[in-house]
Image (spheres, grey):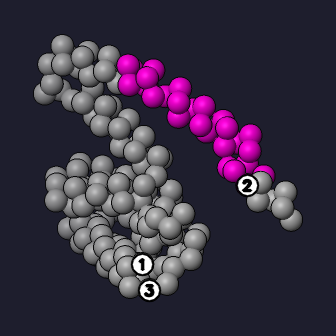
Amino acid sequence: IFLVGVSAGKINLKIFRLFLRFYLSFTIIYVVLGYLHFFNGYTENNHVYYGLFVQYKLPRASGLVGDPNVFSFYASLLCLLNYYLRNFRSSFIWLVLVFLAASRTGYIFIAMSSVAFILFSAKIRPLTKITISLFAILLFIAFGNELLTARVYELESFGGRIPIWSAV
């Protein structure tokens, strides 16, 4: 609703920025509560504790959403939106939350959008744009095949669930 309102020019930008600050504040509080529970209480595998999802005994920030992958995508979008609105402090906090979510989706989204932002920026020289493009292509060639192969393996074994299901 807020994004449509901003694009249509129907909402005050100050109200929208206030909404972003409240959402960020509630998300941080919820994630911190999850970490407090994780370090002070008993946690089980694959459970959500406040704003934290525990998987393989490792905490992953899940925010108000509950799923770290979806949260990472939303946090990536809000990171870019705050950067566009020149809220650099909020943008940095959302970026930290993306890394706390430990989701490949968020990492790839942030990397791709950063490269796109640099390439479409008018302030950067063409030689720098070409260098960054080549570097991004080389990184994709070096690590992209490994990521895609790992994902195909996960799809073939249903994300490692076949051994679990075969025991039943």
Query: Mostly what secondary structure, the magenta segment?
Result: helix
The vertical placement of 32 against 113, above or below, is: below
User: What label does residue 38 carry, if any?
Assistant: 1
Alpha-carbon span between mark 1 and mark 3: 6 Å
Q: Amino acid at mark 3?
A: Gly
Q: CA distance from mark 2 to mark 3?
A: 28 Å
Where is mark 3, residue-wise? 41
Q: Residue at (24%, 30%) from the top-left corner? A: 118
Residue ID at (67%, 38%)? 153
Residue 75, position as x, y percentages in the image: 38, 58
Q: Are marks 1 and 3 in contact (CB under 8 Å)?
A: yes
Q: Is residue 87 visible?
A: no
Depth order, front residue of 85/27: 27
Precedes in sequence: disc 2 or disc 3? 3
Q: Please determine whether, in this image, residue 138 is positioned above or below residue 143.
A: above
The magenta segment: 137-162
Q: Position of residue 28 (x, y in %)?
A: 31, 73
**For residue 46, which numbered disc appears in the image?**
none
Does dot 2 land on a helix, a strand or a loop? Answer: loop
Mark closer to the chain start, 2 or 1? 1
Where residue 71 appears, as percent x and y from the top left, is: 45, 61
Q: Name the residue rendered at 66%, 43% in the picture.
A: 154
Q: Secondary structure at mark 1?
A: helix
Q: On the picture, is 94 further left or further right than 153?
A: left
The quarter of the displayed image where residue 31 is located: bottom left
